[in-house]
Amino acid sequence: MNTHEDPSARLQRIRRISTVNAWSVTVLAGSFTVLNLLGLSLPGVLVGAAVTAAGPIELHGLKRLEADPGRARTWMVGSQVWLIVCVLTYCVWRLLSLDPDNPFEVFGDAAQVFELVEVFGIPKAYLASLFIQAFYITYGLVAGLTLLVQGGLSVYYASRIGHLMRDNPTSV
């Protein structure tokens, strides 16, 4: 990316990226929050609401971008850090909640799954091993991708808004 581009073009790019990210987080996490509410999952609602909050926090920063880029940067980077903390906390909680001796407990009553597995001649221990691996890989990927994408976005906001402030200290 060209750090010597026109400040107005840089501002437009920041606005586009932030708008797409903030609304994506708000709609996606908000939808999962509603689904967890309908499923009466208190932990799901709490995590969903916490993650959803990152979207409006970022939008608040975006609204301040022209008038006060320093504060905007704080809000926009802060929203990414908040999102990372929420997602990583959730992933760690889920990983620690898995009982390797009874990995299917997360399904509740899994009798039908076990009947189907028996029909195909797959040993329950082998299925448990695959499930545990998939569980760890899934939450590891979610945590890693969150760190990569949202961490990268926080660095982007910090550096690009910093360039805007340096290029035009009186107004953006």
Image (cartoon, helix red, strand yellow):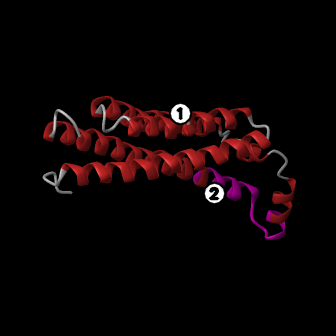
Where's residue 153, x and y in %? Answer: 35, 46
Q: Is residue 114 above or below residue 151?
A: below
The residue closer to the viewer here, 4 or 158, is 4
Q: Is residue 145 visible?
A: no
User: In the image, residue 8 lies at what x, y percent?
Assistant: 23, 51
Where, by quadrant of the figure, is residue 42 drawn? top right
Mark 1: amino acid: Thr
Q: Residue at 72%, 42% (x, y): give it.
A: 36
Read off the magenta span: 117-133
Q: How many marks?
A: 2
Is label 2 in a helix, a strand or a loop?
A: helix
Please name whichever residue, 171 or 153, is drawn nearer the observer in this view of the structure: 171
Q: Is residue 77 above or below residue 107?
A: above
The residue at 58%/53% (across/down) is: 133
Q: Is residue 16 left or right of residue 101?
A: left
Q: CA distance from mark 2 to mark 1?
A: 24 Å
Labelled disc at residue 89 = 1
Point out the image quarter for the C terminus.
Answer: top left
